[in-house]
Image: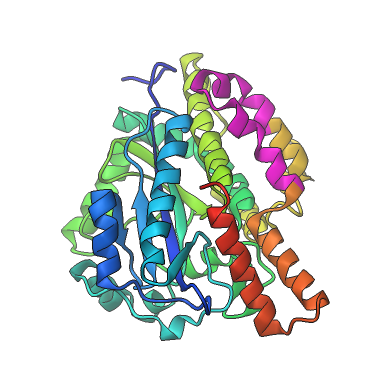
Amino acid sequence: MTGTTDEKLTLGIEEEYLLVDRDSLDLAEAPPDLMTACAAELDSQVSPEFLQCQIEIGTRVMPDIGAAREELRWLRRTVSEQSAKFGLVPIAVSCHPFADWKTQAHTDKDRYNALARDLGGVARRMLICGFHVHVGLSDDELRTDLMGQMAYFLPHLLALSASSPYWQGQDTGLASYRLTVFDNLPRTGLPPLLPAWQDYSRTVEFLTELGIIEDGSKIWWDLRPSHAFPTLETRICDVQPRLEHALSLAAMIQCLMRLFLRLRAGNQRWRIYDRVLIQENRWRAQRYGVGEGLIDFGRREIVPFAELVDEVVEMLAEDAAALGCGAELAALPDIVAGGTSADRQRGVYDGARLAGHDHDAAMRDVVRHLVEEFHADL
């Protein structure tokens, strides 16, 4: 079995965007000509999503975070340029601040028609977008082993990525409302404790043989072995309006994988904690983002998030240096200091209301802010 720091730990990033009308800032359906235009530039790296107002992009296999930056910038820029031809603009946010899911239509494809049929009303509410990071791992047993250890840090990633405080024009009080929608689907949430690859494959085979799922791609845990690629796929994050924040999250994920390999090479591993405890941190991240801290199980206390992030950056410094993503990892405390997207969106809304804008106008100011952030680093 492989499993030393010699693993290449390649990266792949998937992002889902919402399309809004350039003038009204309302959600807008992607016309077929837009998908054709994007595909002419990006080929299979762009695809429609479940709802017609969504579009998904995916990088190729990237050797490091520097290459991922150029690829992701190119993908974002191309989608923006093609959308502009149709009076549309993309935003990278997990929930549109004021759109109503009841008015949205799903994409007419066999896969999505089947989802709408199988999931009923739960699927109709899926007006959410995610951010997925694949890290290449060559061995199945290694993927299972690292999945168990990585689960501890999923709440940290969720807190840092939170970008969905609003739903249908109302402040939900949550930093990541997206998960309250997604968790209504089956086979979601934290990955279970699986001692070996055989346990995972047996579960997938059982569900497949019963006709409940087609394959492992219908298992939607926060972290899963990819069905299509030899990767471990981290799926818990909200999508990021700012390109650089997306890259910092990807760098943290890649560095954590190398840390676990480094521990493994020394016959050590990260401690596995009860899923009930990790779920408590998951809820705290979903509710508060970076504002209220997470439980440090070793210290048996709630630790401010700024302190936790500083510890993570210090712990992963060796791995970041080896992977060439030191600057991206070191920028994580800036997210805490400057606020997550959820914090910034609320700041824009509050500022607009103080300036005399009514609720609806302030909501549109939030979307306008999201448009600006999407394009800031392009």
Q: Nearer the viewer, residue 335 or 135?
A: 335
Residue 12 forms part of the magenta stretch = no
Image quarter (top left, top right, bottom left or bottom right) of the N terminus: top left
Secondary structure, magenta segment, majority class: helix
Q: Which residues are magenta?
A: 312-337
Residue at image coords 62%, 72%: 166
Give the left or right position of residue 317, taking residue 259 as reference.
Answer: right
- Residue 101 at what x, y percent from top left? 46, 80
- Residue 332 at what x, y percent from top left? 66, 39
**In the current view of this chain or complex, which residue is farthest to the top?**
266
Residue at image coords 57%, 43%: 244
Give the left or right position of residue 100, taking residue 281 as reference.
Answer: left
Give the left or right position of residue 91, taking residue 37 as reference.
Answer: right
User: Residue 138's image quarter?
Assistant: top left
Residue 313 forms part of the magenta stretch = yes
Q: Nearer the viewer, residue 247 or 90?
A: 90
From where the camera sits, is residue 140 visible? yes
- Residue 51 at what x, y percent from top left? 36, 72
